[in-house]
Image (cartoon, rainbow, N blue to C red):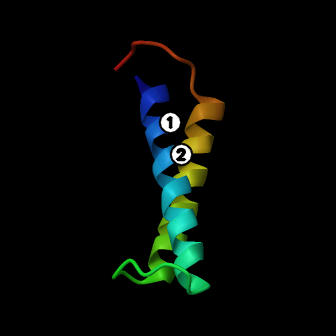
């Protein structure tokens, strides 16, 4: 279960990071601050990668 959360965080972080970087360099307008998207993307991406690296795939809650 925790691996699914890690995968979701990694994918969401990657999407946020790409949208933020594209917004910073001016080729995409999202209506949100591109710096906020980039920072949240980095945080979510590294949190997801950290979960995937350190947690075992068990059904413990």
Task: Label 1, secondary structure: give it.
Answer: helix
Q: Nearer the viewer, residue 24 or 57?
A: 24
Q: Give me the residue at 54% from left, 44% from top.
A: 48
Percent across and percent down for residue 9 are: 47, 45
Q: Which mark is residue 10?
A: 2
Name the outermost residue toward the right: 53
Q: Position of residue 55 (x, y in %)?
A: 57, 27
Residue situated in front as seen by the camera: 46 or 55: 46
Residue at the far top: name it: 59
Whether tag 1 and tag 2 are in contact, CB under 8 A, the answer is yes
Q: Is residue 30 left or right of residue 56?
A: left
Answer with the quarter of the image where residue 17 lies: bottom right
Instruction: Tell me if residue 52 comes above or below residue 60 in the rendering.
Output: below
Tell me residue 22's x, y (percent).
57, 75
Going 57% across and 64% down the picture, which residue do you hit? 18
The Cα atoms of the two marked residues, 1 and 2, are separated by: 5 Å
Q: Residue at x 43, y 81 (%)?
A: 29
Residue beneath label 1, please? 7
Residue at x-position 58% and y-position 63%: 42
Residue 43, quarter of picture = bottom right
For residue 4, above or below residue 47: above
Instruction: Count neighbours of disc 1 (C-alpha within 10 A) and say few if under 14, some if 14 to 19, many if 20 or more.
Output: some
Give residue 6's position: percent from left, percent from top.
49, 37
Crowding at dot 2, Cα within 10 Å, few <14 / some 14-19 / many 20+, comes out as: many
Residue 19: mark in rendering: none
Name the secondary structure under disc 2: helix
Q: How many marks?
A: 2
Which quadrant of the rendered structure holds the C terminus? top left
The quadrant the N terminus occupies is top left
Q: Nearer the viewer, residue 53 or 17?
A: 17
**Up-down: is 8 above or below 25?**
above
């Amino acid at each position: 279960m925790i691996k699914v959360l890690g995968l979701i965080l990694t994918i969401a972080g990657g999407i946020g990071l790409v949208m933020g970087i594209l917004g910073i360099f001016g080729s995409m307008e999202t209506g949100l601050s591109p710096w906020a998207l980039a920072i949240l993307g980095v945080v979510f991406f590294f949190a997801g990668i950290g979960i995937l690296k350190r947690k075992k795939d068990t059904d413990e809650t």
